[in-house]
Image (cartoon, rainbow, N blue to C red):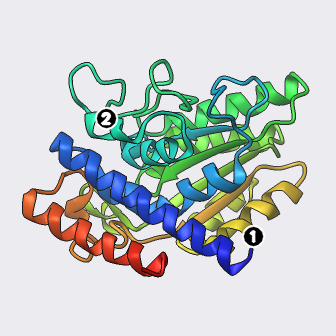
Amino acid sequence: MTEQQRKELQVLACKVRMGILQSTNAAKCGHPGGSMSAAELFTYLYFRELNVDPKNPKWEDRDRFVLSKGHTAPGLYSALALRGFFPWEDLTSLRKVGSYLQGHPNMHTVPGVDMSTGSLGQGISCACGMALGGKAAGKDYRVYTLLGDGEIQEGQVWEACMFAAHYKLDNLCVIVDNNGLQIDGNIADVMSPYPIDSKLSAFGFAVTVIDGHDFDAIEAALAKAKTVKGKPFAIVMRTVKGKDVSFMENNAGWHGKATNAAEFEQAMAELTAKLSELEGK
């Protein structure tokens, strides 16, 4: 990746975070913290990795992405809007009555959403089904799914992992957003899933651990995933909840609440300053 390409992705990730704030602030509710921690991943997937077409969201041979931690829809919506699946201006309709952009992704109303999610633990199972279906149909598409580190406390997640390894789903990439915090606090205190990488490996995955805010690391991990044959691949991303907003970072309180007027102004000012720096203004 060139320095210019890296900078372009950083600009897009900053805009994704701005969209997260704008949508949740307009809704006066939502989940900004875990959306912010995955901004680089959303950005890289939709601008570098996924073989998708915004003009034809249901294209049969597209790559699939399942947001298993469906409550972080504001991050996914921001990336989809930037990529051209729907107008950016619609982000502020989040969770409004009659809006197609609800608090969890709906595959029937939102262009670019491949699976309706929100009940934690179920998304990865759907992704496994998509991957097995692709193999059965002789398709070349790949399937990606993003889970929260609190989400992997769900038993269904590990049943799905066992399924993925059993059926040798090497077209499946499971990504865990390890920001260390869930709604009730530190994941290690609530119900520790550690060591995440060792557990995934024991379930038959090839595993790598990366800095989830480093685009070069994301690129290398996703490239490695394509070289692994005969088993599924997992990426454990170490991230910061509420990334790039000073008062949100590493604060579990921002798991599921929106900013008030003063907080929104401060957060947007911080991101605007970062965007200006990245764009050299």
Foreground residue, 76 or 253? 76
Q: What amino acid type is highlighted by mark number 1?
A: Ala
Q: Which residue is mark 1?
A: 220
Residue at disc 2, secondary structure = loop
Q: Which residue is mark 2?
A: 103
For label 1, the crowd category at 10 Å Cα-Cα, with few meaning under 14, some 14 to 19 and many 20 or more, is few
Seen at 47% across and 42% down, the residue is 81
Left or right for 83, reference 22:
right
Q: What amino acid type is highlighted by mark number 2?
A: Gly
Quarter that holds the C terminus: bottom left
Seen at 9% across and 56% down, the residue is 260
Distance CA(mark 1)–CA(mark 2): 32 Å
Foreground residue, 19 or 180? 19
- Where does the image place residue 208, in percent across and percent down from the top left? 70, 68
- Residue 129: which numbered mark, if any? none
Residue reaching furthest to the front: 281
- Where does the image place residue 26, in percent across and percent down from the top left? 19, 43
For label 2, the crowd category at 10 Å Cα-Cα, with few meaning under 14, some 14 to 19 and many 20 or more, is many
Left or right for 135, reference 117:
right
Residue at disc 1, secondary structure = helix
Q: Quadrant of residue 1?
A: bottom right
Q: Earlier in the sequence, mark 1 or mark 2?
A: 2
Could you tell me if residue 188 is visible in this image?
yes
Foreground residue, 218 or 200? 218
Q: Quadrant of residue 241?
A: bottom left
